[in-house]
């Protein structure tokens, strides 16, 4: 399925749960930040590809949890405008030749129609070709730091909007959120590529058939936790342990 359909799959799956347990934008950004912390923990303690794949899938799920907050939201369009199929929007080259300190991106005027139909797997292949070599050369810690940075920028943006400090039209505010979320997904893909994880497969294995806990679509869970994952329990697959929240 293309990225828009994947987003709507997550909306169908978790929108009712989100309205109850994650009604505000700040809670959803915190939910994403916790998932990235779990991902970093799984990588740092070397819990293996299965745990890391699940952790990456949860990050993707929570990025879409934030997009769902906005209802109709131009996320995929701005993903394609920020990351066009033809070149890097920072250095204007293919593949990317950016230094660590790079210029600001120049958005394309419109999204290429074919990119709007790309699946998550297509996006993963694209980012591997465009950015894979320099990202791998800089290492996984650098990539994780960039992913955490995107969440801090999302948090800062949401706080400025909440405090009335962002004097922009509503469309520009949505654009800012869409671009930050596009960056968050791009760096999530970079983590998967650096570690050799098939991100699309990990996401579909965990969520395609329904909620990762109750296996229903939409989710019927009445238990919700913001606690970090206990990876030792996950690895041991204790039948009495609850599965990590999506």
Image: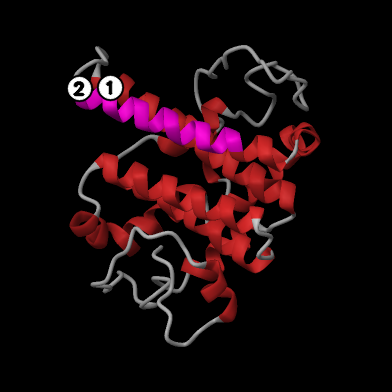
**Residue 36, percent across and down?**
50, 48
| Residue depicted at x 38% and y 58% | 10
Disc 2 and disc 1 in contact, CB within 8 angstroms: yes
Residue 187 higher or lower than 210, as above or below: above
Residue 213 relative to residue 167: left or right: right
Report the side of 195 relative to 6 (left or right): right
Question: Does residue 109 show up magenta in the picture?
Answer: no
- Whether 103 is drawn above or below 71: the answer is above
Estimate how packed mark 2 is, as few (under 14), some (14 to 19) or many (20 or more) residues with alpha carbons within 10 Å: few
Mark 1: few/some/many CA within 10 Å (<14, 14-19, 20+): few
Q: Residue at x 56, y 63 (%)?
A: 54
Residue annotated with mark 1? 160
Q: Is residue 94 visible?
A: yes
Q: From the viewer's perspective, is 63 left or right of 147?
A: left
Secondary structure under tag 2 reads loop
Residue underneath mark 2: 163
How much space separates mark 2 and mark 1, taking CA atoms?
A: 5 Å
Q: Quadrant of the C terminus?
A: bottom left
Q: Magenta stretch: dominant SS?
A: helix
Residue 45, located in which quarter of the rendered image? bottom right
Specify start and end residues of the magenta stretch as a single range.
145-162
């Amino acid at each position: 399925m293309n990225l828009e359909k994947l987003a709507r799959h997550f909306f169908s799956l978790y929108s009712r749960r989100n309205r109850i347990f994650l009604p505000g934008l700040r809670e959803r950004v915190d939910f994403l930040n916790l998932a990235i912390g779990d991902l970093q923990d799984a990588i740092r303690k070397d819990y293996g590809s299965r745990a890391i794949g699940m952790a990456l899938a949860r990050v993707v799920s929570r990025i879409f949890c934030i997009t769902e907050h906005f209802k109709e939201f131009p996320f995929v369009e701005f993903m394609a405008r920020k990351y066009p199929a033809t070149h890097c929007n920072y250095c204007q080259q293919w593949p990317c030749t950016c230094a660590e300190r790079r210029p600001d991106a120049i958005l394309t005027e419109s999204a290429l129609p074919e990119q709007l139909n790309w699946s998550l797997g297509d996006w993963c292949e694209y980012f591997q070709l465009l950015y894979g070599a320099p990202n791998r050369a800089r290492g996984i810690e650098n990539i994780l730091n960039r992913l955490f940075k995107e969440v801090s920028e999302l948090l800062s943006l949401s706080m400025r909007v909440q405090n009335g400090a962002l004097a922009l039209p509503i469309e520009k505010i949505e654009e800012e959120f869409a671009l930050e979320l596009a960056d968050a997904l791009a760096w999530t893909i970079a983590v998967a590529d650096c570690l050799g994880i098939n991100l699309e497969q990990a996401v579909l294995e965990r969520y395609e058939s329904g909620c990762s806990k109750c296996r229903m679509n939409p989710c019927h869970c009445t238990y919700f936790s913001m606690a970090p994952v206990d990876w030792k329990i996950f690895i041991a697959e204790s039948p009495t342990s609850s599965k990590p929240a999506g």
